[in-house]
Image (cartoon, helix red, strand yellow):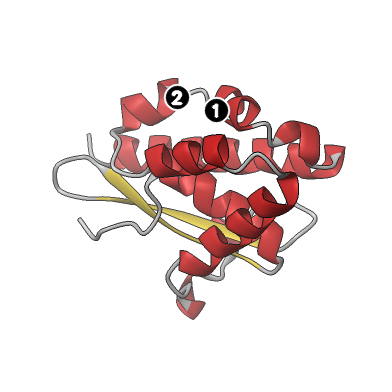
Amino acid sequence: MDTFPIDYPRVVEAFEFLQDWDARYQFITELGEKLPPYPDEERIDLYHVPECMSTVYIRAIRDNEGLFTFHGDCDTSTVKGVVAILLGMFNGRTASEIDEFDADAEFEKLGLFEHLSPSRHVGVYAMVQRVKRQVSAIEESHV
């Protein structure tokens, strides 16, 4: 499996260290910049998250051991950083681990929802659901 550039436990550590929200926003933007370039051939409806106000693409990829990694992109820097955090949460997990993972609780723990607009909160929820649906569909095709 390709090494995913975002290590979620380190994101949590950084958020605990960075007490100022301006510094956290800068860190979120930097996380988005760490995402590998998104392949143009994956900019299709299948991977688009239409519920987001920003243009977001997320693709789940399953390896031979049943672990998932992801491609993701967004046209706005802050949301691209949120995409990076979300994909870092799910990276290297199995389908059942992803299905059971409470991303909302993790975003709450980071304090992100209190600093994102309600429309962005809806977009984050849509991204989580899109990931879980993709993973489920991929797993069903491997049965």
Describe the element under mark 2 as helix, strand or loop: loop
Q: Residue at x 21, y 40 (%)?
A: 66
Quarter assignment of residue 18 = top right
Choose mark 2 or mark 1, whichever is in front: 1
User: Residue 62, can we see it?
Assistant: yes
Q: Residue at x 78, y 32 (%)?
A: 114
Q: Residue at x 58, y 60 (%)?
A: 57
Report the residue marked by disc 2. Answer: 101
Describe the element under mark 1 as helix, strand or loop: helix
Q: Is residue 69 left or right of residue 134?
A: left
Pointer 2 with pointer 1, Cβ within 8 A? yes
Find residue 101 and report its horizontal and vertical position in percent: 45, 24
| Type of amino acid at the residue the image marks with label 2 | Phe
Q: Is residue 1 above or below residue 9?
A: below
Q: Residue at x 75, y 60 (%)?
A: 54
User: Which quadrant of the figure contains the C terminus?
Assistant: top left
Report the residue marked by disc 1. Answer: 106
Find residue 50 and report its horizontal and vertical position in percent: 71, 53
User: Residue 51, can we see it?
Assistant: no
Q: Is residue 68 above or below residue 84?
A: above
Q: Is residue 19 above or below residue 44?
A: above
| Type of amino acid at the residue the image marks with label 1 | Glu
Crowd tier of the residue under label 1, counting other residues whose Cα lies within 10 Å: few below 14, some 14–19, many 20 or above: some
Q: Is residue 102 above or below residue 116?
A: above
User: Which quadrant of the figure contains the N terminus?
Assistant: bottom left
Q: Total label count?
A: 2
Q: Residue furthest left?
A: 65
Crowd tier of the residue under label 2, counting other residues whose Cα lies within 10 Å: few below 14, some 14–19, many 20 or above: some
Sequence-first tag of 2 and 1: 2
Find residue 116 and report its horizontal and vertical position in percent: 79, 42
